[in-house]
Every structure is written in structure tokens, then in C-alpha cells.
Image (cartoon, helix red, strand yellow):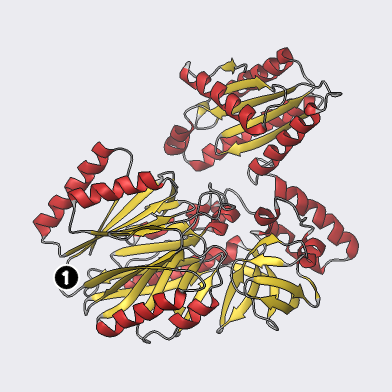
Amino acid sequence: MKQFHLTYENDKKFLNKLNEIREWCEYNSAYKVIFRIYSDDMEKEHIAHVCDLLDENMPNALYFGCTSNANILDGALTETTILLTCTIFEYKSTQVKLLQYPFTEENYKDAVDNLKKHCEENPWVNSIEMHATIMNMSMKGYCDEMSTLRKDIQVFGGGAFNPDMDDETAYVFSKGNGFSQHGIIFLLLGGENFHAYSTFISGWKPLKRRFRITKADKEVLYELDGKPAFEVYKRYLNIEKNENFFSNTLEFPLFLEREGVNILRCPLSVNDDDSLVMSSDMEENAYVKIAYGDPDTILNSIREDGQKIADFQPEVIQTFSCAARRAFWGDMNISKETIMFKDVAPTAGFYTHGEFLRMDDNMLNFNVTLVIVAMREGDPVGEKVNFNGPTFKKLDKIPMIWRFVSFIEASTAELEAMNQKLSLAAITDGLTRLYNRAEIERQINKALERAADEANDDRVHLIMLDIDNFKKVNDIYGHKEGDNVIIALSDILRQVAEELPQASAGRWGGEEFMLLLEGNSTDEAMAAAEKIRESFSKVAFESAGHQTVSVGVTQMQKGESADKMCNRVDNALYMAKEAGKNRVIWLDA
């Protein structure tokens, strides 16, 4: 078994890579070729174009895929929007079959019945990889049906998703079947020389307080201990019923036991009656606990299971990681979970909406979980390798919640203090301690609402900043030095904001930052931007030396939306980059 990873940037590069693969297949007498396509580009036309290129240039290859929250390349989170993995089977005995069916709560049984028929007709099947659109769909009936498959068949996979976790749009697609927003794909794998080993990693730990589910219907959780389910999150975690509910509860799924396995369920939203819409089904009379992510436990689990995967001596590793784990770790650290697997075998995958794994004949739908599948053809070749798992001490960011584990057991006064810290953590960026993207966006919207009042003549300015050539800092000096650069700019932003009468600073994403000013003149806004630029350029970093920042500045126009103003300041920043970087550019309407 051989695997190539390739990305789509433009036709020329993509076709060159396809040509390399085709030549390798011809030279090595490959028997079967399968492309998996993961895309966090939601434009179907872009994905379809890639599929057309595959049809034209490798017409005998199969392909299938889905939209994703993000992609995993060489074991790490990648900025690549369309990722392809090409798996080449080298044994004549290895068999594959690709199926795609409609998939809703009304017709899931038809899909499973058809799958069972194919498995009965093809006794070589020993593994099934699946991708499905499962948003707002009860998975219990499907999992029950899948549990009745032949006992020797492994099943694993993930739910299609969207980069915007609040957006319900997601697609699956495959060769000859097109796109489906309500569909499921099965890749049947097997043969006497095909072997797979699958496992899952959680790492979330339950708090002591236990609750009984006293009322539930499918994925709607109505009551815990006879009270509206939302009250648990309000009382113990001080999480409010607002637009931030989903992002604030990602770190606090409910922990329960199903079929002897500990699994997690995430609250997605709150209904008017204070019931919770959960990520998957809930069962009445079951007991649940609030769980929290513990980095030490997560990484210890990866070390233990990673060695088992290394001992299997795979040729290919597929990963299905929940998007909630990405939200928990943050993009700076999420790759710590998976990057070391690339030293065992080529590793790729995507960030999912729900993960699936069959264990002891039972098909389980997980959340906030990492499912890892190792595959190979034939007997192991060479010596076993030692799995060098991640080390906890090297983490750059530690999620805030696990620091607050004991607050639920504390007295009322201690609980209130911890809840205040938790509320702050929900709106701040873990590395910089500035506002996170969601909160600075909320601050901008509130500022525009205040300024829209005719009696309020306060002026609103936005300053957007981007560290110049930041990728080179990470590439050359390492992510730790990159964090030092980000933290230094954050400290300068915080200092400047504190000197102004009404200012809010936030991390917009990666190395981008936003400073919101209210009640300042344009001259004052430009002066603040120039002060940040100049102060940052004077900082001498231990390894990276002096770095610079490009800055865009704009002022609110009467009646405009936050999106329009943010787009304009982003354009100003782009102009600063194009003009040579390390400068401040003003852009009017």
C-alpha cells in the first residue's frame, strides 16, 4: 500500500502531481487507486472541478469525500482548502467497493439494508470507511442497525462538516454519484492481505457531580434531575443563553457511558423552553456528568494508543478528529494530537461533525473524540518503531477550563469567583489574553449600535494589524518564538488600549489583531496605529530579532454594518502589505 498526499492550488501544479502518481502506478503495477477528498472550501464548483480533473486524467481511479471543518495533512492542521490523499493498493487480493446513498432519519435503514446486502455478497469485506451528513439527525437508529453487520467487519469514519460550525451545510460526494447534502458514503475494503486497526482517543474527564436524564427525546435533552437541562450550564458554569452558547460549551460536553464505552455529547443550542439540542441522542434515566478537557490525560492517551498503532506497523493512517477538539486546543496546538503519527506512516484526515467507530459489535457515534485508523497490506515489514508521543511540558497554550476543575466542589463564594473567571475565559484568546474573535466582533457590533443613535456623535474607528512575514518566523525559529512575537504585539496593543478613553483589543485570528476605538478623532486613531507599529518594530526578540507589523485604519460611516466596516479595514491592511509592509494605511469609504 502506498499513499500520496496532494493539494489543489491550481490546475498546473495539480496535474503535475497527478502525472507523478500515474507514472508511479504504471512503473509499480498498481492494482487499485482511491482518492479521498476533504474540502473546507464549501463551493461545490471548486470541488467538482477537482473531480473532473481526476476523471479526465485518472479515469480508472475511484474518489469520494466530504466537506470538512478543516483538514489534516502530514498529521497537522493545514491551511489547504482542498486536500486529497491517494491510496494505491499493490496486492491483487485487496478488494474495494464504493457506495453512496441518500441519508435521512426517514431512509437510513434503506442505506444500511443495501450495505448489508453488499457485505453478504462480498465476504471479503472486513472494513468499512464511512462519511455522512449527520447535522441535526438522530444517529441512534442508524447505529443500532449498523451494529447488526457481520461481526468481523470494522466500521469507522466521520461526519461531514463546515468551517463555520454554526452553518448546517455539508456535503458528501463520490465518483459517478455527485453531491448530496443528505447522503452517506461507504468504502468497502478487504481481502486476505488487507488489514486495519482502529481506536479512539478522548481525554475528557468527568467532574464529580452526577445528573440523571429525566426527560429526553432523541437529540433533545429536556431535563436533568427534573429541571430544565440548560440550568446545569447556567448554574455550574455561568454560561448564558446567547449567541456564544455553542462555542462556550464546546469544552464542557456531557460524559456518559454507552455499551460499556465512555462517550461525550456536546450541547449545540438552547431552545426557548431551556431544553438543549445535543450533538447526538440522549437516553432517559441514563446518568451524565459535565466533562472537561484535560491536556495531560489527552496526551497520555495518545502516547499509549500511539504505540499500539506503531506496533501494528501501518502503511497508512487515517484520522477523524472532532472539530470541537480543534476549538478546545486552538489552531496553534491542535496538531500536537496527531503530528507525531506521520513518523509512523503517512497521516491525513479531517475535522468532523461526529466520529464513528464500531467496538465489540456495537456501532458508536462519538463527539469530541479522535478516531484513528491504521491500514496496511500484507505482513508487517521491517522492525517496529518506538512511538514518540507528545510531551505535556512543551504545550504553548493550556485551555483555561482544566485550571478550574475544583470550582464545582467549592463553597458558594468560591463558585462565584470561579464563574467570573470562566466567563472571562469564554471571551478571551488563550494565548494573548485579549478578546477572542467572537467577542471583539460583538464589541464592534455594540459600538456601531451605540453610534447609530442620532444623539450619540461618538466616532468609531477600527485598526487592523497583521505581523509581516510571520510564517517565516514559525518556519525558521519555531512556533515557540512565534508565540513570543504574538504575545509581544498583544502586550503593546493592551498598553495602547489602556491609554485610550474607550478601546477594545482582540485577536482576529492567527497573527491578525483588531483594535476598536470609540470617541477618538481620526488623527488620534492614526497616532495610536503609528505608536503600535513603531513600538513593535523596536522589540528585539531572542531568536527572531526585530519584526514589523502592517496596519490598516478606517472610520465608521453612518448606518453601515460591522461586516462592511471590517471589510474596509481589511482592505486597508491589504494595501499596507502591498505598499511594502511595516506601515499604516488609512482607507476612507
300 relative position to 381: left or right? right
Q: Position of residue 481 (x, y in %)?
A: 53, 38
Q: Quadrant of residue 305?
A: bottom left
Q: Is residue 434 visible?
A: no
- Element under disc 1: loop
Looking at the image, the residue that sits furthest to the top is 523
Q: Position of residue 507 (x, y in %)?
A: 63, 37
Q: Quadrant of residue 246?
A: bottom right
Quarter of the image with the N terminus in it = bottom left
Q: Is residue 505 visible?
A: yes
552 relative position to 34: left or right? right
Quarter of the image with the C terminus in it = top right
The residue that appears at 76% across and 69% down in the rendered structure is 229
- Front one among 171 and 434: 171
Looking at the image, the residue that sits furthest to the right is 413
The residue that appears at 57% across and 53% down in the rendered structure is 165
Q: Quadrant of residue 274?
A: bottom right
List the residue tagged with mark 1: 91
82 relative position to 519: left or right? left
Tell me the crowding category of disc 1: few under 14, some 14 to 19, or many 20 or more residues within 10 angstroms, Cα based: some
156 relative position to 412: left or right? left
The residue that appears at 74% across and 59% down in the rendered structure is 404
Kind of residue indicated by mark 1 = Tyr
Is the residue 420 above or below the residue 574 in the image? Answer: below
